[in-house]
Image (cartoon, grey):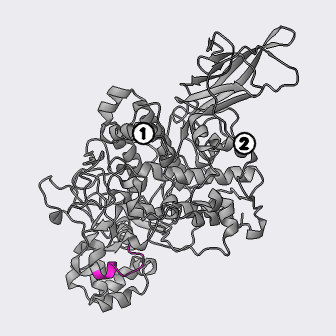
Amino acid sequence: MTSNYTTLHENDDISTPKSPRSNIKIVFGLLFAVAAVSVVASSFQVTNKTTLTETEEDTLQVVNEFETRTGRVLNDGLLENLVRVHSPTTLSLKSGNAVIFHVETSPGTNEFTQLNQEVVSNIDHVFTEIGKHNVKASVTASDGTTSTLIYTVTAKVIRIELRDLTEEDRKIYFDALQKFQFTSEIDGVATYGKKFHSLEYILRMHLYGAADKECDHWHDDAGFLNHHVAITWQFEQSLRKIDPRTASHYWDYTREGARGIDWYDSDIFNDDWFGSNSPNNADHVLTTGRFAYSPVWKATDYSTIVNPYGLLRSPWNTNPTAFVMRHNKTFAHFADGNTEFPTCSEFSEVLDTSLKDGLELLNGVLHGPVHIMIGGHWGHLADWSAVGSTAAGADGFLLLSKWLWRQGFIRTPDSCSDDTAQDDCLPTCPEGILGSEIDDLSHKDAYDILEETGVIDLDPTTAIAAIMKKNGLGWKDLLKELCHVGSPGEMFSSTAPQDPTFWPLHGNAERFLSFLRVSKDRGVIEFDETWGYTHTAEVPSDTGIVCDWSEVEAGSLEMPTCSKGTCSGHKEDDLLPFTDLYHEQGSTLLTNSEFYQVIHPYSDKLPYAFDTFSYWEACDKHNLFDQYASSSKVKAVSKNTEGLGGM
């Protein structure tokens, strides 16, 4: 059976083995020599110098505000003459000679606009279109003849770490993001055109992939990063329809720990930024800041996956609160047991890896904890608080509930009216499936059910039986809790894109993978890019099971057929559900393999680039390789790898 998650339903219209450590070629200082070139600010000046000698160089130089302010060359100098679209760029010749500049009005038109009437040594210009622009510099040689030199400048959207933006650029970003957060598909298309897609539209795509009963098409396997790079790309298109000066800027969350900042005190959670990580109200709703009362959209008329209240949530998430929610405790365990966000040290250890290993780590330990720490999980039965606050892997309780739901043991109401209390609209494990009401089961019967469903083998906690016994609980209580499910915040669910922190989070993962690919191309590391994913162990979010619901009659208690397999969306030749990301793509769907080539940092199809791959503020000497070299031994990975952002 093949899932149809890549296509929208007709009625859905809204408008090799790991290399040994010794094989790494450690490079101290900056990874790329070109990035060590100092950046010098240039000011506009008219000069009387009109000739240049035969020995002087005529290389075009492009410098912008970011480079002048930070001393770092855009994109580490990987792309020659790269400029940031919609940002002033200073053009000059390396020789310092005075010239007349002409710039192509639009890429490929061969029509030019003259920038200056008198010869100048440098001039500022704003490129407003993405693509390759020809730039002409007319110069007068020593014999009095005039010649024209032609250069190519590549204009791209530049994604910058949020804290490295200027105040003005950061305001532009957040103003656009705020409009995106609150704009419906109908209003957005009417205001910004047909290329705009709203949060509700993009979120539905994530929901179709992550909340399918069959399996998770977007997470816990090889397709994870491709899907999230693509959805972020699509988000950026919409964001730039609102304001073309901005981009899907990223969040390097390794900085918090290195700066000695407790994760919950990060600037990220200021009201002018993304708002509180744990709102102080019973519903855990954001009520202050620019994203206060961010809506969770009602979508029964255009989405086949909704919760019983018709909200864009997983069916098992029966919370009726129609706003974005966050909580800093997961099953009563503060930050799911984490004390900080993933660190530079953890990223640096992945330098000695393969694509298979890298995708598994990026899916889990290198980004998953951030989702859980912001989202949280609450609403558990009161007598489980002591267990949740002491057990390792507290996030596993929600993940195990989801696993029971996919297998058909947990069922949810088809619909609940808006005035139905959540307590009257909860998931249940029906008597018709268990053979008895849960309260009538013995602990032995409950254990047998948990064993049959694989929960016992997948349990991520340590010494769960001893912890339950200490707190007067047994296997029947565990089954009852898992069937109860509780409530997660958006970031710890399949609707993570509802939370605006979702967007900058994944940019850092793409930047890191790009760093690995470029490092390989430069001969710095060995990086096996054979397609695949390292399944290190069976955990609640990575069971390797696909459940076929195609023969189950709607509303019945029939059970799906579940078997070992790879969920569609993760194989090398599986199609991704994204179109019109770049001009040549149009409506053609790309395979994982094809898309992986499209997003190579050297790809001409990418309309964006990152400010830097090699600069990591939190690392030793701000460099991942120096961090790797300074480690006395490989650091044991301690964070939970099974806690992911999509369920």
Residue 461 x, y percent position in the rendering: 42, 80
Q: Start and end of the magenta stretch?
A: 386-394
Return the disc, 1 or 2, that comes first in the chain's sequence: 2
Tell me, yes or no, whether the two marked residues, 1 and 2, touch with CB atoms within 8 Å: no
| Residue for badge 2 | 37
Cα distance in 3D space between marks 1 and 2: 29 Å
Residue 243 x, y percent position in the rendering: 42, 31
- Left or right of residue 154, residue 217 in this image: left
Mark 1 is surrounded, within 10 Å at the Cα level, by few (under 14), some (14 to 19) or many (20 or more) other residues, namely many
Residue 351 x, y percent position in the rendering: 67, 62
Residue 125 x, y percent position in the rendering: 58, 23
- Left or right of residue 399, residue 71 in this image: right
Identify the image quadrant of residue 25.
Answer: bottom right
| Residue for badge 1 | 173
The question of residue 120 being in magenta is answered with no
Quarter holding the C terminus? bottom left
- Where is 478 relative to 271, above or below? below
Looking at the image, can residue 349 be seen?
yes
| Amino acid at dot 2 | Val
Judged from the image, the secondary structure of the residue bearing numbered disc 1 is: helix
Question: Residue at horizontal 88%, vertical 25%?
Answer: 55
Judged from the image, the secondary structure of the residue bearing numbered disc 2 is: loop
